[in-house]
Amino acid sequence: MSKHLLPSGFRNALFIDLDILVQNYKNLTSLLDSQEPFAVVKAEGYGHGGVEVARAVYEAGARWFGVAAVEEAESLRADGAGDGFADARILVMSDTLAYNAIRLVDADCDAAVWHVEQMESLAGSARGAGKKARIHVKVDTGMGRLGLRPQEAVDFIERVSREEGVEVAGLMSHFARADEEDGGDATGGQIREMEALIHALREKNLLPPHVHMANSAGLLNYPHAPGNLVRLGIALYGSSPQFSRSAALKTAMTWVAKVLQVKNIEAGRTVGYGGTYERSSPGRIAIVTAGYGDGYPRILSSRADALAGGMRVPVAGRVSMDMLALDVTNIETIAPGDEVVLLGEEGGGAVSCEELADRAETIPYEIMCGVGVRVPRIYLREGKVTHVRKL
């Protein structure tokens, strides 16, 4: 039954099909009008591997990338040194306080800014390096998170435009409810606030060259949202935001784990911590090499399915740190060393991120990002392994 996908000695691994990611990128960019795509690769590319995702979509034409932490930007720059990736624009979207100013300048990053102290630190660091710091002024149009209020932004940009060592490269905001069925009024209000700010800045000849507001949900649900950049996040990785119009997307992740033991259990015998799983008739249990220490959510105890030979089998009992049990009573042939699919497709079966997220009472973002650092990532192009990386 085993397909022997895992390299020798691997207990489990996440297979990342970079061709699928590139196709998602192309399908999403085909929906754009005159906007430029902006690939969000923070949090290790939503668990896929930030450098690998960035490299793949860079080769497909992407030149804008978004990260959260300055370390993520530095990793991209280090990977791209000397082979062309250096011409990419990398926006650090939150980790931009004063103490990181010199690192942001050294890594040639754009930086999201919402406070004068950030701007002054970036300006000083840039002047010392003989450069100009590029900033994107973050405006809170209704997210209630980072950013200036729109009525503060005009004066702020006017002040920044007089500062030596700083270039106002962008204006940005973020939708709060673009992925909600009843979020139209709130999203429409955000759009109107942003449009009014754009008009006011244009009147004063202060409008930055790059404006971005739409995320994946914004692209799919509000394609005429203001801006000439569109931030491609969860959709790039194959998951459509909730209540979005359809897009041709496919998940690039397949999570495979080994079977450690297959054992017969009699009726009434319990499985796992707390004895929460009990069969009313004799059956068989497969013990699998993945648990919440690998990022498989414990809340999925007895609530999720996996695939064995392409057939769905239930998680039996509580997920442990390093192992979980599957009820394989209905699988005719399964043995230690065989492989099961925890997430992804096999044969005619599929367990999607959306399904696991629904059963875990969370969102696909968390399922993707939650796959742990001890799980190796195995990268595929044209169905062949290109390299393996542990995060």
Image (cartoon, grey):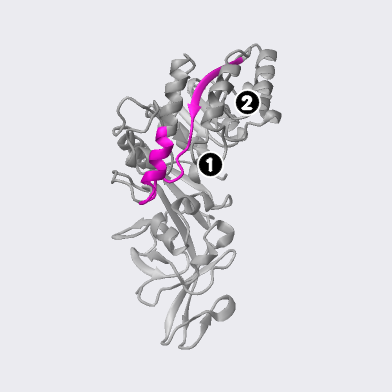
Residue depicted at 42% across the width and 22% down the height: 199
Above or below for 58 versus 328: above
Element assignment for label 2:
helix
Q: Nearer the viewer, mark 1 or mark 2?
A: 2
- The residue closer to the viewer here, 278 or 138, is 138
User: Horizontal and vertical percent for residue 229?
Assistant: 41, 28
Residue depicted at 52% across the width and 61% down the height: 297
Above or below for 353 versus 131: below
- The residue closer to the viewer here, 307 or 140, is 140
Residue depicted at 44% across the width and 16% down the height: 203
User: Horizontal and vertical percent for residue 375?
Assistant: 54, 52
Whether the magenta-drawn stretch holds residue 178 is answered as yes
- The residue closer to the viewer here, 27 or 186, is 186
Return the residue at label 2: 104
Q: The magenta stretch spans which residues? A: 166-192
Quarter of the image with the C terminus is top right
Element assignment for label 1:
helix
Return the residue at label 1: 44
Q: Type of residue at label 2?
A: Leu
User: Horizontal and vertical percent for residue 283?
Assistant: 42, 82
Q: Type of residue at label 1?
A: Glu
Q: Total of numbered circles in the picture?
A: 2
Tell me, yes or no, if residue 18 can be seen here: no
User: Horizontal and vertical percent for residue 159?
Assistant: 60, 17
Tell me, yes or no, if residue 186 can be seen here: yes
> Around disc 2, counting alpha carbons within 10 Å, would you say few (fewer than 14), some (14 to 19), or many (20 or more)?
many
Comes first in the chain, label 1 or label 2: 1
Q: CA distance from mark 1 to mark 2?
A: 19 Å
Whether the magenta-drawn stretch holds residue 186 is answered as yes
